Image (spheres, helix red, strand yellow):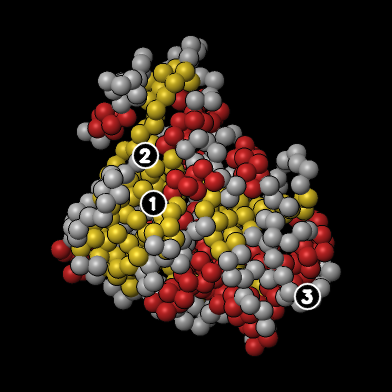
Amino acid sequence: MSRNFIINQIDEWAKKDPERVCFKDGESSYSYKQLKRDSDTLANHFINSLEKNEPILIFGGIYYEMVVSFLAAMKAGHPYIPVDSQTPLDRVEMIISVAKPSCIIAWDELSIDTTTKFINRVQAESILRDDKSIELKNVISGDDVMYIIFTSGTTGVPKGVQITFNNLTDHLDWLMNNFGFEEGDKFLAQTSYSFDVSVMITYPCLLNGGVLNPVSKELIGNFNDLFIALKKMDLNIWISTPSFVEICLLDPNFNGDNYPNLKSFILAGEELKHSLAETLVNRFPNAETINAYGPTEATIIVTKMVITPELLAKSERLPIGEIKTGTGMYIVDDEGNKLPDGQVGELIIDGPTISPGYLNNPEKTAEAFFDMDGIPSYHSGDAAYIKDGIVYYQGRIDFQIKLHGYRIELEDVEHNLNKVSYVKTCTVVPKYKEHKVQQLVAYVVANPHDFEKDFKLSKAIKEEMKHHVMDYMIPQKFVYVDALPLTPNGKVDRKKLIAEVNN
């Protein structure tokens, strides 16, 4: 047996119950036997063609082949970098520049000029037809980096959060023993693999011999087909952002009567609004609704709060919950002094799930990570308070926000908006509703142009911007001004604009 219990346990299903389905995409199903065979074969190729430990960039949507690639990378001793196929080419190139991967495997079309070893879908499928077995001599284990998730960065260059095998092992131990997962559970797989919530879907499901049920972006764009597909999945476990649940609640038939086997909703990635939680609890009285919180740097989630009618009745803003076993949390003021129960400050997280830092970025790593009495610790940048062991989120202390579950640095959006030919200067601020970011509003000083109407200018800016950033980073509203307001020390008065937008 290898030193990697994740690989051991998933491969064990291929021996115990080889035809058991692990991934069901509409009418296409894939077994645990196929998963082991394909991941072994691809791992064999990696072992024979790449240097151990160098990262592999894996590009694509929510596909079976992506899961094969993740397991193959682990078996061959390589960290993997999942990149969604909707990622703009500019951003993919920046990720490659930072990560310096030894190989890129693209399950979707990726037109990129690179000297890095490149495997497209046709080539990858040819490799998989070779059917090779391997010995797990190089498998990822211990403090080896297992995967790297790229998040938004303040300079416009994304940061690669490194998560080790030990980080994830500690997280999974807590998850598997505290969230009611059972053998054979059918999991919703809706979140992009470049979003870390997908990790807490993929591995608990496969470790328990469950079935991953993917939902594509195309399906989400067609409500009628989406609701039909979701019902056919007969799901047991729903893990997603609150925003996706909000879409599903538009269907009056999205309720416990029509989804009788759905036993839990685990909502993470952004703040859960009281009104949404209340609707969900009322629609699914027999399912458990869980509010979960955690930054990517602390390995996905580190708190859990079961939402009950009693909690809803006494809480205007929902707590993010009880702290994960083995994880420490405390609140500090601006000088780093610990604050007593009930006082708001920055939330510090410590313990065995804290990332070793950002890939090839020692400066940003030093800013965010530190050791306290030998314990790895992380500045979350979140304002919070703790009372009676329960953590209450109070927003961001800086200008990093979450929109539809995606973490966004406002400076990153501004950096890329300033690249647009029609923009002279700009600043971007969030508009809130019930403490949750609803949209990004851009204040723009425009360069001279020929557009007669503002909406035509906005359309042109969005069109140019989409080549540089993800869709969710493009502001939804544009306000055109002659000059941006400044503070007495000459900086853009972002707080004034936030107040104006949210008045």
Would you call the spot at circle 2 few (<14 residues within 10 Å), some (14-19), or many (20 or more)?
some
Q: Position of residue 191 (x, y in %)?
A: 50, 58
Which residue in the protein does label 2 denote? 399
Is 26 displayed left or right of 72 in the figure? left
Q: Are marks 3 and 2 in contact (CB under 8 Å)?
A: no
From the image, tell me which residue sits under label 3: 134
Instruction: Tell me which corner region of the image, top left, top right, bottom left or bottom right, holds residue 340.
Output: bottom left
Instruction: Give the residue at x 43% y 63%.
Output: 374
Quarter containing the N terminus: bottom right
Query: Which residue type does callout 3 highlight?
Result: Ile
* Circle 2: element type: loop
Residue drawn at x 36%, y 14% as measured from the top left? 482
- Gap in angstroms between the C-alphas marked 1 and 3: 41 Å
The mark closer to the camera, 1 or 3, is 1
- Separation of residues labelled 3 and 2 (CA atoms): 48 Å
Classify mark 3: helix, strand or loop: loop
Q: Which residue is mark 1?
A: 379
As rendered, which of 260 and 130 lies closer to the eye?
130
Residue 305 in view here:
no
Q: Nearer the viewer, mark 1 or mark 2?
A: 1
Tag 2 or tag 3, which sits nearer the N-term?
Answer: 3
Q: Which residue type does callout 2 highlight? A: Phe
Give the percent coordinates (x, y) of residue 14.
Answer: 67, 82
Of pointers 1 and 2, the one earlier in the residue sequence: 1
The residue at the point 30 percent across, 21 percent down is 489
Tell me if label 1 and label 3 are in contact, CB under 8 Å: no
Considering every residue shown, the one lying at the far front of the view is: 373
Question: Does dot 1 land on a helix, a strand or a loop?
Answer: strand
